[in-house]
Image (spheres, rainbow, N blue to C red):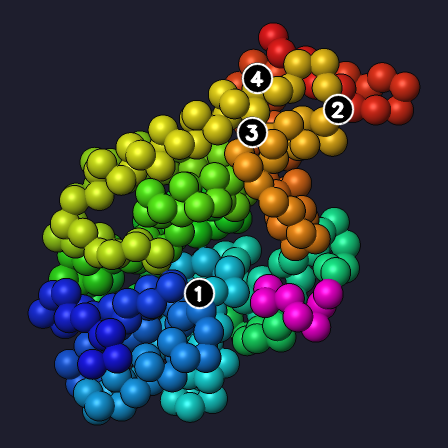
């Protein structure tokens, strides 16, 4: 039924590009955990909700990225439900068009066609433990963005947002977007030992054991750090970025350039934090040096 998968007694998820969770509260209402990535998925999710006879009581967003909040406005307008997101993330949920500005360091190019620049913002309240229905729990998952959280349903099912992705994401993109590489690695190490009946990452299939996938993600981030470090000694950012693109076989357009320059700078920041890299200002240029 519209890819809605029952994965526990009262917990479901819509299998799509950005998996969305549904929890049946047992009184004719349900909780949504994220709201999909595009109109087709939002429509499929609503059809499944309608066929079950549910009304949406509340939306819990794991984080602010557009592929997790695209249905917020539709479900709010349709059901009159409240929307919750973690502190700091609430600002970007409300003003989602602001987010691309820190990839582009200003107004994005081709705004009219940019997926991330669609005006889908909605008022959101802060997601804290005290607003959760009975039996739900939150878990901080720093690294992918400002303040992402994992959400556990009373069935012991964890929805993990973008904390962990499938192997094909690293094979296809090599440098998926992160806000803090070192915190992401720490989060992945923690998730290796997290207890739960089932784990639902946003961009891959649910699994009873994600420890191997967490290790794969952490190892990929560490390997990327090593490769970027190898290109950094005595070079300015532009030379490092060009070498990384050649090494990883990345073909650029303006959108990729914006997101990947942001991402490579985040890796360089992680190396500076590690103390394996330093930087000096030389003749108006920032030059990186291995230590």
Q: Residue at x 15, y 70 (%)?
A: 6
On the image, the x and y values in percent for residue 222 come to 43, 26
Q: Are marks 1 and 4 in contact (CB under 8 Å)?
A: no
Foreground mark, 3 or 4?
A: 3
Instruction: Provide the residue designation for mark 1.
Output: 68
- Residue that label 2 marks: 236
The part of the chain drawn in magenta is: 110-116
**Mark 1 or mark 2: which is in front?**
2
From the image, give the main secondary structure of the stretch colored magenta.
helix
Q: Is residue 150 above or below residue 33?
A: above
Q: Which class describes the residues within 10 Å of circle 4: few (<14), some (14-19), or many (20+)?
A: few
Within 10 Å of disc 1 (Cα), the crowding (few <14, some 14-19, many 20+) is many
Q: Nearer the viewer, residue 233 or 139?
A: 233
Residue 230: numbered disc = 4
Q: Gap between marks 4 and 2, in whole Å? A: 13 Å
Residue under label 3: 247
């Amino acid at each position: 039924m519209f890819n809605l998968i029952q994965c526990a007694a009262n917990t479901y998820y819509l299998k799509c590009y950005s998996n969305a969770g549904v929890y049946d509260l047992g009184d004719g209402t349900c909780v949504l955990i994220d709201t999909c990535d595009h109109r087709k998925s939002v429509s499929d999710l609503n059809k499944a909700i309608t066929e079950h006879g549910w009304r949406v009581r509340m939306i819990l967003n794991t984080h602010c990225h557009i592929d997790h909040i695209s249905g917020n406005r539709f479900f709010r307008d349709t059901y009159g439900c409240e929307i919750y997101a973690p502190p700091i993330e609430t600002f970007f949920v409300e003003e989602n068009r602001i987010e691309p500005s820190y990839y582009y360091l200003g107004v994005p190019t081709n705004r009219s066609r940019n997926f991330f620049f669609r005006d889908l913002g909605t008022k959101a309240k802060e997601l804290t433990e005290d607003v959760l229905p009975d039996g739900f729990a939150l878990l901080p998952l720093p690294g992918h963005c400002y303040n992402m959280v994992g959400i556990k349903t009373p069935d012991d099912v964890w929805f993990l947002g973008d904390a962990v992705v499938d192997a094909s994401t690293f094979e296809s993109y090599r440098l998926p977007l992160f806000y803090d590489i070192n915190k992401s690695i720490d989060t992945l190490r923690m998730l290796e030992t997290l207890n739960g009946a089932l784990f639902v990452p946003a961009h891959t299939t649910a699994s009873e054991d994600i420890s191997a996938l967490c290790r794969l993600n952490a190892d990929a981030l560490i390997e990327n750090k090593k490769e970027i470090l190898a290109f950094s000694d005595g070079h300015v950012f532009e030379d490092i970025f060009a070498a990384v693109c050649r090494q990883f076989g990345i073909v650029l357009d303006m959108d990729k350039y914006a997101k990947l320059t942001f991402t490579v700078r985040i890796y360089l920041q992680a190396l500076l934090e590690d103390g394996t890299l330093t930087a000096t200002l030389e003749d108006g240029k920032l030059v990186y040096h291995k230590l």
